[in-house]
Amino acid sequence: MSVAMAKDLLFETAEYQARIAKVREEMDKRGIDLMVTHWAQNIFYLTGHYTFAISNYQCALIPRTGEPIVIVRDLEAGNSRTRAWVKDENIVTWEDTDDPVAVTLQVLEERGLSTGRIGLEENSFYLSSRNAGRLRAELPQADVVDAGGVIEMVRRVKSPQEIEYIRKACDTTAAGMAAAMAEIQVGRTENDVAAAAFSGMVRAGSEFLTNDPIVTSGPRSGIPHTTFHRRVLEQGDAVLLEFGGAYNRYMGPLMRWAIIGPPSETQQKWSDLCLEALANAIDAVKPGVTTGDVDDACRTTFERAGLYEYYKKRTGYSVGIGFPPGWVEGAVMSVQQYGDVVLQPGMTFHMPPAMRMPGEFAVGFSETVVVTETGCEVLSSFPREMVIR
Amino acid sequence: MSMAETGIGKELYFSLEEYQTRLAGLRTRMAGQDIDTLLVTTPENVYWLTGYQTIGYSSYQCVVVGMEGDPLIVVRLLEEGIARRTAWTDNFLTYADGTDPVTATVKAIGQLGLSNPRVGVEEAAWFLTVRNYRKLTEALGTLHDGSGLVEDGRKIKSAQEIEYIRLAARTTEAGMEAAAQAARPGVSENDIAAAAFDAMTRAGSEYMAIDPIVTSGPRSGIAHSTYLRRTIEPGDAILLEFGGCWHRYFGPIMRTVLVGDVPSEAERMTQVCIDALNAAIEAIKPGVTSHIADKAARDVIDEFGFTDNYRKRLGYSVGVGFAPDWGEGHIIHLNENDPMILEPGMVFHMPPALRRYGQWGVGMSETVLVTETGCEVLTGFRREAIRA
């Protein structure tokens, strides 16, 4: 590779170093000498490296001193060299004919990192049991421990730059929501609506999504986790929409619903109830309260109305960095009953209260919010109301 | 009202006979490894065996396959509605949020009534966390690695699966045509990606495993880069790779747009990719090895002196996919020194691509089917550089 490409860093090197310093504080508390992270989100957070091809083995090593080391497939070398703030010597690649776990072990050995207490993230979607077992078995000198959640502790509070990226992501989502709403009419398909949403978001600057726009309509909308499947929209259909635009890998999700024709009495009532629950949640968000307090504010709205059984979920979850298959920072924290995380300025959440009549319809609203010094700021900028088409 | 009481209709995309055939084949392979209870957690495998599909597949899900009877699907309570709608069996065990899915799985295994089951787990799977794997070990004792048992059945596609790949390819072609129309100086990479997604999805594609890949100019010379708001300029190469989806099956295509006058080496590389792809298509037939197919393309690239600009395998199996990947390269692929013998019904995506690092990248692909006598190209888009 004779031509050096300029670095394309999304944060100041000082910000990466500050994050790593905080991770090292957490490592110190646990006596961990080396973190080995296999979460795409954490690799990105600490080194800047990212790719859409996260089904290939990749990891980052965070030692007690010095730069992190990124281990990626050879095909990803270009991405790493432009996106990771570390020196080229700290980007190690494996070829398609190599065994990536063996390469990782070799790097640990060569750099004197194969002893001491090593933290593996055993909650990672991208660390297989087989690879974890091999790393444990082939590091006999080390005390390998489960350190899932250590880096996520640091990710809980976003920096001003991170919040700015989430804000920009929210703007792309709003553009997609406007385009999707305009597309909804009898005779169009769920796919047409999803196409409009994607186009609206991506033309407004969104990057590759963590999951494609969620569009579900009519009876299928009453089934959780359905999405567009070529269904033709009919008079009287409820259409549930949930998208997350991405900006510099930060996500800004948003949920809204629309109805083709006038809503039924139940739909109107449920829609109002979801709005009330969301408003109650937003009002509850401020420094010092717990995630459980926020969930109480939202959940009891449904309980007071005697309609909890149509809701039955948590209030929300942390949002920030997103990679497929989802924008949920579930490993960072949830807003759920009995949640004991104390809110601090800079935490960001997506809160989507929704109600479903099984097999008939769904209604819901959400906002992406940030905890401020004094309360809560809504980062999304789309009218919070039922849309009648 | 529970999901079970709503009378939600089924959405089945394969016949019950086909699912039973898949299950019977799996049981034969399980017996071959002396496994009588297999825990299937890979999203693609769960879908292939049961039909159950959800966008919530990052939550714990597990199909417990014994040696007889319907498989038992362990799913999150929130998933029950879509599981009942999409799976051919109604044999479910749900777990509520806040309860331990491994406990539910152990209970499900207990329902098989085996006194001393030999349990297989997909140890190579993503999404099954090490924590849950450990809990399974603690509850069940020694586990056996059942990775690949389901995948072995996915290597050869049925007529219905091939039909869905064809339908997926039609949507990919619509996206490629829209991108070809959209690409010109002054528009952004994002505009082209939006045009591609829009056309694929309006043509019927379902949610994708990878959003349209669009990378241009110097960044196209970086592998696995994609749209990032760059404005197209004269002289750019634009690398496009899309995979439309039909019932979770994929038919990907890669093409290259050359904008105005591009460096002569970029032109030459584009032609070499076409020649390499043609050579591979010529070489593919039942009985030849993966190595031979790979070599057919590699020889062309080597002959023109672009070995260092290539450095990858020729291609990989495609079929069922969920994000983050549409490929089945971990099951079978076309690679150097690979002795795997091609059989009718195998489907591969073959994207020979050449890069001049930080300057340009070009490539050309087709999704192909190994037939009884040779090779059928399932994707249908003009196999030449797109001029803009």
Image (cartoon, coloured by chain):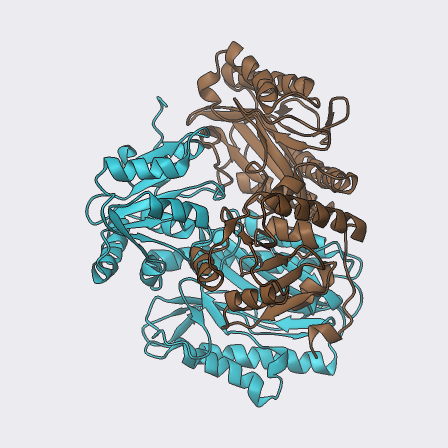
Q: Is residue A375 left or right of residue B236?
A: left
Q: Residue at x 68, y 63 (%)?
A: B82
Q: Point out the image quarter for the C terminus of chain B.
A: top right
Please identify which colour was used for chain B in the image: brown
Q: Point out the image quarter for the N terminus of chain B.
A: bottom right
Q: Is residue B26 left or right of residue B222?
A: right
x then y, percent, for residue B268: 55, 14
Please identify which colour was used for chain A in the image: cyan
Q: Quadrant of residue B261?
A: top right
Q: Residue at x 66, y 52 (%)?
A: B47
Q: Nearer the viewer, residue A255 or A107?
A: A107
Q: Nearer the viewer, residue B186 or B169?
A: B169
x then y, percent, for residue B127: 50, 54
Query: In the rendered image, is residue A128 in sight?
Result: no
x then y, percent, for residue A207: 50, 47
Q: Residue at x 62, y 27 (%)?
A: B365
Give the mark count: 0
x then y, percent, for residue A297: 47, 83
Q: Is residue B293 left or right of residue A323?
A: right
Q: Is residue B319 above or below residue B294?
A: below
Q: Is residue B215 above or below residue B382?
A: below
Q: Nearer the viewer, residue B272 or B335?
A: B335
Q: Residue furthest top?
A: B303
Q: Is residue B235 above or below residue A354?
A: above
Q: Residue furthest front?
A: B115
Q: Quadrant of residue A261?
A: bottom right
Q: Is residue A271 above or below residue B268?
A: below
Query: In the rendered image, is residue A218 in sight?
Result: yes
